[in-house]
Image (tube, rainbow, N blue to C red):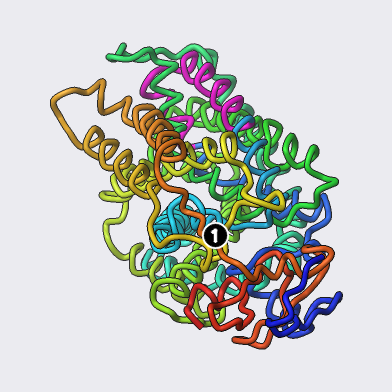
Amino acid sequence: MSMTSERPALEVSFIDDPRVVKEAATEDYSTHVVPLSWRSGRWSLTMAWWALFSAMFWLYVAVASADAVGTPATLVGMALTVATYGGVNLVLSRYAARTGLTVALLSRRLFGVLGSALAPLIFAATALYYGVFEGSIVAVAFQKYFGGDVKFWYLGVVLYALPLVIGGVRTWLDKLNGVLLPLYVVGLVAVVIMATVKQGYPDNWLHSAAASGPLPGWLTSYLIYMGVWIMMMYTIDYARFGKAEDRRFHGTVTFGWVFYLFTFAVNGLIGIYLLRAWHIAGSETGVVDAFIHTLGFAGVVVIFVSQTRINTANYYLASTNLDAFATRVLRLRLPRTVWVAVAGAVAYLLMLTDVLSYLLRALAWQGVFVTAWVAIALVHIAVRGADRDGLPEFRPLRLVPVSAGAGAWLSASAVGITLTEQKANAVLAQLAPLVTIALAAGLYWLALRFAPDPVRERAGDPRDEVENIWEARVRCDACDRSYVAVEMDRTAQDKVVCSACAADGR
């Protein structure tokens, strides 16, 4: 351990700052590294994350794919998707657990301090759009069964959801979703049984074909599922709460192929079976109709439970990333509860518009940015991984404002959006996600190889002044809070600052 006599000594402790712990109950270290003491137990994190298993969107997207390319091709696309998502999220979940970083903090290393600001904004907007979609499903179910103005149901589903996400992952969301998971599973079993009793077994549900297109059907199905690569970003912001000793379990079960087997394959097959049994074409409300036709009021309850679970994740991640964006760009340091309310207000306003008319296009654009981000993150983990101490450098004072990686991200995304929007070549439009990934990965690799290193060499690293950077807590001179030494730095005036205060210029 080295110490420089001219610098004031660090104020070090080895227990969590009680004020930080109190804030973390709702803030969940959204702008800080997650310390080892705030990591979740194995099943606690699993229950919180498996909220995403119960989205009605997974039933809908499978039916949409089967309508487009046929069920056999969709099954192949599903299998490839499960394998891809399982492999990618195995890597990302382990990296997030090792580093304790959010998407926003990791993006600093990839794109520079200013260049990273776009990542949490896109993340928040995408999570919010999915929240709007899933919330609309509940509102439509209530309106179809009970009647009334759907606008009031929109307001109701937003208002009841917001209090549920004020608590963080380990203080509330794990418990809520642990209780609701069995109800959703029972509902899925019941809807399949009752649909068969009422409608009989749909003989051709696994064999329905569709008109041939310019690409093989299985590839088209695979590309449809690529539209939800936002799940990779979701993984990082949840997996950062994982413990090192649980990395194999989380990489396989919680975030890996087991989760996606149930989420994509089981949900998808049930969706296809259900709508084929009732002879309903795939649509945003078709799944709602099938559940209500099958189970009546119990179907409404299953939809309510499923959408409550998924929207805890959507609103939680929308609020944490709005917080990260506002803190960095707008210099607004407000409680996460404020951003929960903002997310709810924006979601309700979007529901009042003809959101489905532009939702898919908005998600397509954002999906381009997301797939490019994932490709860049994977290249960085594979090629660079860590800068020191097993971590990527994310402290603002040690990074350039904008790196060459930001240019790679924006360039690849611009090409992807152009391909998506052009009408001259349908094949290129469909292949836009794959082109975007290849281009983003290639450009970022070139940036790592030939561009100037975005990490600045600076003296006075507090990490060099403690024995264990994960156990020592160091007081920040700016906010008077103590955080793990991993994220602490010194200004040019030798003030000790945490990562959040350094980003604010405090």
Picture residue at 67% right of the left edge, 88% below the top? 480
Q: Name the residue located 51 percent from the left edge and 55 percent from the top edge.
A: 455
Q: Is residue 353 left or right of residue 48?
A: left
The structure residue drawn at horizontal position 40% and vertical position 28%, both measured from the top left corner, is: 438
Q: Position of residue 342 (x, y in %)?
A: 44, 75
Image label count? 1
Can you say whether 3 is above or below 423 in the image? Answer: below
Quick check: is 496 in the magenta stretch?
no
| 214 left or right of 383 in image | left
Front in this rendered view, residue 281 or 80: 80
* Magenta residues, start to end: 60-86
The residue drawn where x is 74% and y is 77% is 474
Pinpoint residue 216: horizontal percent, then vertical percent: 37, 12
Which amino acid, by three-letter code, is at mark 1?
Answer: Glu
Label 1 sits on residue: 457
Near-viewer residue (129 or 468): 468
